[in-house]
């Protein structure tokens, strides 16, 4: 009956159930009691009639700190299918749900396992997933549901979730269509009240309609408390008035029923057996007539012994429409009923109920620990230690949020300030690892650390978000001093982590030479081998020119050992990018990605992907860069890393510019700039300016191109980045020559030449050789540029051929020019660099030679996501293997391939490999 006035919403949900193509689901938002559950119940019934299988989970406030409790509830009916999952997914899911031991699972591997399991079940029978009160789901379960929601648009799966107004949930940004439930209009409210209480006196009916104000739960529940209306303060919020109505209803029940209700309300599970066991023990210990919430006040009841309660003790509560009993579970009819009961009980009664649950849950240490904590009268080191062990178990299962909550509670119960601070700092470390900046900061400040070790930990934790963007650049020098102090105390690992954090800041912001030197001095003094990947990367970030030769030597020594440790490969890929060795950067970062995927480390994955994409674009390998950049942006958004998203988006803009898609390039560049400007993220802004320079070069707006690219060399400009500015010399030189700014360009070269004497940076030397040839063209200078080792740098070789051919034609050496122009055209065609290929065609026409039109290659016919799938399929991976690689269900992969084949005019994987073979060239 609560569905009076909800016909439009119910119709929309039924249409979703009947035709779920390309729709992942709905997030229903509204205040408590607005009718969300009733709407979902009707939708589930309609889904069952339509042939869908319904899986449900409901968040409970008491379960907020139990990792994966909500997921366990959702997947319990399909748990048999876990055994058939791929081994890494199976082990991760079993560990997360506490069904087996194993290594700490990644949340993303757990999400992929849940997605695969649900997709397999949906293949047999479409699924409706119902998640109620997601604001009370434990964080780990909510994150998995959000992960699944983003990936089911092509699956026969629908997710319908409900959330209370004003509450936050990770499902908000998971691609679910929003549905907001407002209060009922006057006519619908009147119809509902008449259906619930048809024989009300007119005056009472008018009063109830006014009190309820269109609130469905109030319209259905207040009529049963008509006699109490005059006792309810009309100034109180409606929710509180409803809770008082429910409390009054409880007060009229027998003592045994009230006791059982209190225990059920405090129990995080719906187990009827647990409630009856704990309530029986509690009643047996109660002295009759003591005036407590649980004492008898004249109501009759059976003589009770511990464990002797039967389910019928709750029959009065069922008759009072407070709870329902079914299949061994006791369920409150509404969360407001559940919250009203403990609120009305005395602290002593609540404490006794918690202690009774502690005894009833003797074989469940995590739940016991939380009830012990709730019953604690003050600091208690024994309970704090139990909670610390609970945190360890939660972290072991991959439930970082649950572990943080347990450590916070342990800190509150700690007897010593030092123990309290240690526990809060451990919680903060987990918050950092899981990307929860605000939580980490709150925990560090609450810890009030004392002593060098705790202060060092606190400073490091506060420095690890967003690589220092939005911080004062002076923070880098502070971190250098901190690292030195921590190293003096013998904590070399902590000092190295602090240095890495500070070194990353030298990429995103510019701290100045003095701060860079301070970091370098500390790194040099650390008793760590010179070939330690962290030291190599720190040195590259801090001193890309001064130490470029050392870094390159180490990188070339280590390049043969890629694939052993993805974290090592990621460090080395980052180091290679800093010193302009883009071929090595692409190789190391490409080697890091599979391991990071397999381990489910999706927070680090977009960093490796962004380095790979940036490097591949500079090399001219657009076909490989397109899917990598798109995936980097997608995972950066999903893992809450806005500046990595900005960098990946800027790379996508650069790709569009090189392909001649100027409109897309400008749109993406503007989007990336908004992210970068907000905090002065220099690599993002540098790549944006590079994109604009490339676009204006292609459009023939040479003065604008020179102005765009020159900004990279102005230390006062937010687009200035110490290393990256030196890796776009060729583009800047070309713009300068065509804009008549050769003198200005020579001044810039005067600044860069000394750097070239200090580092063998491939990108810098390639750019300088090109600049010398173009500024002062001779056969010898162009020959020098072409004779350099450009085997892994096809775009740069094509650029030199194009410039050489253009100069030869202007020298009236037309026949000679054609060879170079033809080579340039063929190179740029193969690389998909459309704008540059068209320029080569124009020059060839002027040299008297026509060129065939270029058809779009296979990769350009596909979206970046489709291209990624197609390339993996062409490499021989199965749908299941592709799904594991890209964090998709294998059925979604199959759907994409079904769309890809006709786009490319192929009908098999073998044909696909042949069609895409040019992309690997």
Image (cartoon, grey):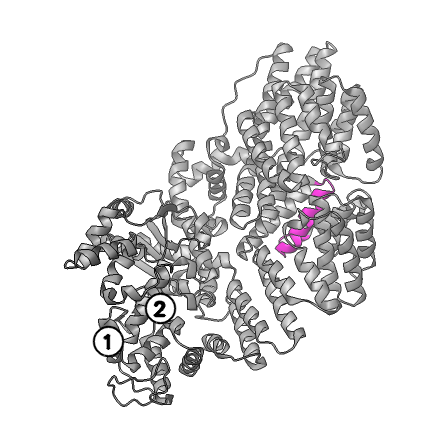
Q: Nearer the viewer, residue 28 or 493?
A: 28
**Element type where label 2 sits in the image:** helix
Q: Residue at x 26, y 85 (%)?
A: 298
Residue span colored magenta: 561-581
Q: Which residue is mark 1?
A: 316
Q: Residue at x 39, y 76 (%)?
A: 345
**Element type where label 1 sits in the image:** helix
Q: In the rendered structure, does residue 570 fall within the stretch colored magenta?
A: yes
Q: Position of residue 692 (x, y in %)?
A: 63, 28
Q: In this rendering, is residue 253 above or below 463?
A: below
Query: Is residue 209 toward the left or the right of residue 808 in the image?
Result: left
Q: Position of residue 766 (x, y in %)?
A: 75, 32
Residue 367's image quarter? Answer: bottom left
Residue 243's image quarter? Answer: bottom left
Q: In this rendering, is residue 73 above or below 358?
A: above
Query: Is residue 267 toward the left or the right of residue 737 in the image?
Result: left
Circle 2 Cα neighbour tier, 10 Å, few/some/many (<14 / 14–19 / ≥20): many
Q: Which residue is mark 2?
A: 338
Q: Nearer the viewer, residue 141 or 100?
A: 141
């Amino acid at each position: 009956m609560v569905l009076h006035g909800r016909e439009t919403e119910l119709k929309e949900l039924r249409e979703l159930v009947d035709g779920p193509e390309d729709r992942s689901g709905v997030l229903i938002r509204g205040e408590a009691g607005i009718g969300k559950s009733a709407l979902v119940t009707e939708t589930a019934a309609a889904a069952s009639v339509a042939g869908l299988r319904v899986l449900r989970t409901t968040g409970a406030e008491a379960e907020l700190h139990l990792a994966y409790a909500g997921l366990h509830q959702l997947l319990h009916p399909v748990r048999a299918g876990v055994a058939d999952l791929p081994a890494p997914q199976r082990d991760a899911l079993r560990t997360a749900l506490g069904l087996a031991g194993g290594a700490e699972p990644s949340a993303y591997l757990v999400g992929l396992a849940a997605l695969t399991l649900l997709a397999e079940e949906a293949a047999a029978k479409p699924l409706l997933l119902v998640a109620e009160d997601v604001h009370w789901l434990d964080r780990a379960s909510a994150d998995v549901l959000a992960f699944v929601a983003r990936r089911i648009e092509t699956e026969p799966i629908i997710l319908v979730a409900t959330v209370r107004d004003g509450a936050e949930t990770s499902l908000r940004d998971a691609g679910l269509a929003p549905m907001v439930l407002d209060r009922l209009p006057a006519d619908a409210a009147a119809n509902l009240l008449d259906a619930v209480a048809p024989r009300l006196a007119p005056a009472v009916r008018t009063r109830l309609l006014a009190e309820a104000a269109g609130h469905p739960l109030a319209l259905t529940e207040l009529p049963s408390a008509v006699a109490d209306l005059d006792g309810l303060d009309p100034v109180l919020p409606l929710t509180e008035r409803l809770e008082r109505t429910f409390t009054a209803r409880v007060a009229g029940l027998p003592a045994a029923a009230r006791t059982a209700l209190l225990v059920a309300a405090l129990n995080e599970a719906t187990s009827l057996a647990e409630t009856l066991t704990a309530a029986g023990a509690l009643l047996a210990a109660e002295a009759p007539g003591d005036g407590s919430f649980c004492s008898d006040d004249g109501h009759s009841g059976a003589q009770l012994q511990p464990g002797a309660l039967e389910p019928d003790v709750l029959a009065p509560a069922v008759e009072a429409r407070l709870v329902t009993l079914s299949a061994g579970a006791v369920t409150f009819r509404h969360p407001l009923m559940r919250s009203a009961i403990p609120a009305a009980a005395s602290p002593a009664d609540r404490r006794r109920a918690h202690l009774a649950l502690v005894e009833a849950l003797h074989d469940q240490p995590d739940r016991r620990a939380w009830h012990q904590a709730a019953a604690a009268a003050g600091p208690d080191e024994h309970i704090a230690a139990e909670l610390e062990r609970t945190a360890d178990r939660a972290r072991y299962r991959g439930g970082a949020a649950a572990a943080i909550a347990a450590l916070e509670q342990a800190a509150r119960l700690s007897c010593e300030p030092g123990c309290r601070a240690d526990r809060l700092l451990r919680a903060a470390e987990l918050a950092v690892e899981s990307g929860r900046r605000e939580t980490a900061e709150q925990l560090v400040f609450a810890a009030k650390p004392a002593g060098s070790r705790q202060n060092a930990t606190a400073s490091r934790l506060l420095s690890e978000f967003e690589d220092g963007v939005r911080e004062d650049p002076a923070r880098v020098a502070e971190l250098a001093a901190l690292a030195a102090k921590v190293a003096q105390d013998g904590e070399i690992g902590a000092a190295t982590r602090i240095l890495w954090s500070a070194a990353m800041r030298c990429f995103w912001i510019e701290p100045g030479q003095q701060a860079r030197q301070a970091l370098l001095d500390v790194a040099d003094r650390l008793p760590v081998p010179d070939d330690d990947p962290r030291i190599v990367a720190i040195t590259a970030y801090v001193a890309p020119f001064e130490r470029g030769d050392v870094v390159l030597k180490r990188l070339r020594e280590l390049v043969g050992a890629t694939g052993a440790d993805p974290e090592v490969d990621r460090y080395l890929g980052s180091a290679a990018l800093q010193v302009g060795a883009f071929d090595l950067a692409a190789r190391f970062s490409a080697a890091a990605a599979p391991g990071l995927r397999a381990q489910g480390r999706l927070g680090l994955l977009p960093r490796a992907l962004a380095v790979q994409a940036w490097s591949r674009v500079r090399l001219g390998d657009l076909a490989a860069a397109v899917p990598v950049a798109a995936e980097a942006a997608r995972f950066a958004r999903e893992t809450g890393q806005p500046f990595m998203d900005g960098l990946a988006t800027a790379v996508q803009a650069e790709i569009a510019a090189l392909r001649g898609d100027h409109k897309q390039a400008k749109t993406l560049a503007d989007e990336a700039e908004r992210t970068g400007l907000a905090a002065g993220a220099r690599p993002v802004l540098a790549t944006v300016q590079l994109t604009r320079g490339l676009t204006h070069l292609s459009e023939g707006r040479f003065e604008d191109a020179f102005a765009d690219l020159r900004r990279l060399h102005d230390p006062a400009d937010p687009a200035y980045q110490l290393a990256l500015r030196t890796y776009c010399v060729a583009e800047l030189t070309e713009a300068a020559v065509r804009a008549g700014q050769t003198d200005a360009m020579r001044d810039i070269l005067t600044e860069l030449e000394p750097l070239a004497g200090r580092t063998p940076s491939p990108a810098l030397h390639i750019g300088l050789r090109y600049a010398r040839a173009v500024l002062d063209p001779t056969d010898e200078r162009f020959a020098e540029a072409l004779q350099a080792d450009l085997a892994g740098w096809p775009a740069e070789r094509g650029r030199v051929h194009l410039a050489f051919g253009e100069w030869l034609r202007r020298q009236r050496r037309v026949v000679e020019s054609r060879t170079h122009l033809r080579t340039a055209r063929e190179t740029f065609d193969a690389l998909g660099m459309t704008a540059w290929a068209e320029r080569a065609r124009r020059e060839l026409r002027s040299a008297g030679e026509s060129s065939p039109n270029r058809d779009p290659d296979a990769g350009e016919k596909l979206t970046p996501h489709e291209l990624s799938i197609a390339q993996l399929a062409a490499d021989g991976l199965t749908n299941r293997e592709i799904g594991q690689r890209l964090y998709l269900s294998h059925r979604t992969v199959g759907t994409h391939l079904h769309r890809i084949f006709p786009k490319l005019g192929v009908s098999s994987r073998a044909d696909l490999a042949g069609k895409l073979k040019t992309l690997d060239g």
